[in-house]
Amino acid sequence: MYPSLEGKVVVITGAASGLGKSMAERFGAEKAKVVINYFTEEQEVKGIIETIEKAGGSASAIQGDVTKEEDVKRMIAHAIKTFGSLDVMINNAGIENEVPSEELTLDDWNKVISTNLTGQFIGCREAIDYMLENKIKGSIINMSSVHQEIPWPHFVHYAASKGGVKLMTETLALEFAPYGIRVNCIAPGAIDTPINAEKFADPELKTGVIELIPMGYIGKPEEIAACAVWLASTEASYVTGMTLYADGGMTQYPGFQAGKG
Ligand code: NAI
């Protein structure tokens, strides 16, 4: 547990599902005040708020689309109005779809880039603007992916967006380090969330993914939430511009395991 998170105001985008939901619940367990941004999954929100409140945290939900500037501004204004501040911004919302690159439409490209990269930029900019103005030494966490590093055929738009998240994170970390604002990203490997539901429902595809993970299992959302609370806490006070890989070893060239190569 991280006592420094008690009472901190945390905004999480895409928090009604998967990693966002798990992070919201974990911050709740740390007794933080959590703003749950949801996009379409309104029916999930009540249960998440109940879980957070039962654990001793506070929560409030707001609908919004991270690709729309006015929606992201509304999310942050909601945090300030409801809980009085903003200490931690987690740009988590993301999408992917599989298409061979020669068939990828500009529409699909733009959708993924505007959600995964531009949406995260708007979240960073708005949070940093507020933190600067109010002299808050806040923490910003961007949800990247092992595909900020590992090329991914049929997901060129996704890989490009996450590569962008990496350098955006590093650049903002450098720019705002003098003000004590830390900007980091988490790069999960394969985690059991709805984004992967279709793939993991197919035993052959699931086995294929597990073969790429030296630790031999698909990660659990709570294992990513554990990274987020650490990064947001004062335990990580000297950490900025970093990517925290949480991937069971996926980025360690699994093809070379057990003396191969
Ligand atoms: P998910 O599909 O369960 O959650 C994504 C959430 O983002 C959903 O609640 C969705 O409604 C929301 N969202 C989508 N477009 C939005 C928009 N325009 N505005 C606001 N919210 C929007 O998937 P998951 O796994 O929880 O993904 C969360 C993040 O983690 C994404 O950025 C994803 O790229 C990243 N990630 C996930 C991995 C995994 O294996 N699950 C691996 C690496 C990265």
Image (cartoon, rainbow, N blue to C red):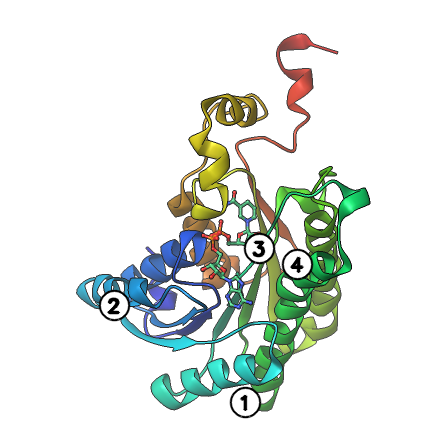
For numbered disc 4, what is the local secondary structure?
helix
Mark 3: few/some/many CA within 10 Å (<14, 14-19, 20+): few
The kind of residue tagged 4 is: Val
Q: Is mark 1 within 8 Å of ligand 1?
A: no
List the residue tagged with mark 3: 95
Mark with earlier residue (1, 2): 2
Q: CA distance from mark 2 to mark 3?
A: 23 Å
List the residue tagged with mark 1: 134
Placement of 157 over or under 203, stated as above or below:
below
Q: Is mark 3 within 8 Å of ligand 1?
A: yes
Q: Residue at x 60, y 50 (%)?
A: 96
Mark with earlier residue (4, 1): 4
Q: Position of residue 197 (x, y in %)?
A: 44, 40
Dividing the image into 4 quarters, which one contains the C terminus?
A: top right
Placement of 205 over or under 199, stated as above or below:
above
Does residue 150 appear to the left or right of 127 in the view shown?
A: right
Q: Position of residue 5 (x, y in %)?
A: 37, 67
Foreground tag (4 vs 1): 4
Evaluate if marks 4 and 3 touch, with contact meaning CB atoms under 8 Å apart.
yes
Q: Position of residue 137 (x, y in %)?
A: 55, 76
Foreground tag (1 vs 3): 3
For numbered disc 1, what is the local secondary structure?
loop
The kind of residue tagged 3 is: Ile
List the residue tagged with mark 4: 112
Q: CA distance from mark 4 to mark 1?
A: 32 Å
Residue 239 in view in this figure = no
Q: CA distance from mark 4 to mark 3?
A: 6 Å
Mark with earlier residue (2, 3): 2
Does residue 172 appear to the left or right of 231 in the view shown?
A: right
Mark 1: few/some/many CA within 10 Å (<14, 14-19, 20+): few
